[in-house]
């Protein structure tokens, strides 16, 4: 679909969910690796301290314009994606990620809320590892 300045615009992901459910999607980041484009995104609610439901997903495509699908083949345009990082009892609502490659190592940078410190916002960095079948994994 053309934009006002005649450049083509592509939809890469969507969250078609019921009205009463969190449908937020933000903080996308694209990474090219081994012939695939990986779309990292944050889903659900940010910025609510320990009540944040934010989490990160990833999908991949051979084309930068998609379609991006999770490991199970379901489309990010339908609100899916492979879970990359989800909060736990200590760190809640991880998301709003960025990706960094430095001297052969790969990292994801994100924020999360520290439930052991009254929901203090923290900036975290975790190493990205890759599975044999080409999917990124990250530990909280």
Image: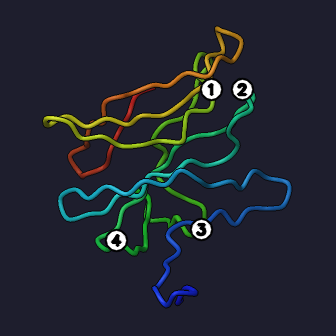
Mark 4 or mark 1: which comes first in sequence?
A: 4
Q: Which residue is mark 1?
A: 92
Q: Which residue is mark 4?
A: 64
Please tell me which residue is depicted at 36% across the width and 61% down the height of the picture: 60
> Residues under labels 3 and 4: Cα distance?
18 Å
Q: Position of residue 4 (x, y in %)?
A: 58, 87
Badge 1 density bin: few <14, some 14–19, many ≥20, Cα 10 Å: many
Q: Position of residue 26 (x, y in %)?
A: 59, 53
| The C terminus sits in image quarter | top left
Residue occupying the far top of the picture: 116
Q: Which residue is mark 2?
A: 49
Mark 3 or mark 4: which comes first in sequence?
A: 4
* Camera-nearest label, 3 or 4: 4
Q: Are marks 2 and 1 in contact (CB under 8 Å)?
A: yes
Please tell me which residue is depicted at 67% across the width and 47% down the height of the picture: 44
Q: Which residue is mark 3?
A: 78
């Amino acid at each position: 679909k053309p934009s006002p300045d005649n450049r083509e615009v592509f939809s890469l992901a969507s969250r078609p969910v019921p009205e009463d459910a969190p449908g937020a999607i933000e903080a996308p980041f694209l990474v090219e690796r081994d012939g695939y484009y990986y779309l990292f995104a944050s889903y659900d609610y940010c910025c609510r301290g320990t009540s944040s439901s934010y989490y990160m997903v990833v999908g991949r495509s051979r084309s930068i314009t998609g379609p991006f699908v999770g490991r199970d083949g379901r489309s990010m345009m339908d609100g899916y994606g492979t879970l990359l990082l989800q909060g736990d009892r200590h760190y809640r609502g991880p998301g709003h990620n960025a990706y960094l490659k430095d001297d052969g190592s790969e990292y994801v940078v994100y924020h999360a809320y520290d439930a052991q410190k009254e929901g203090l916002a923290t900036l975290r960095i975790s190493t990205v590892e890759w599975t044999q079948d080409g999917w990124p994994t990250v530990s909280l």
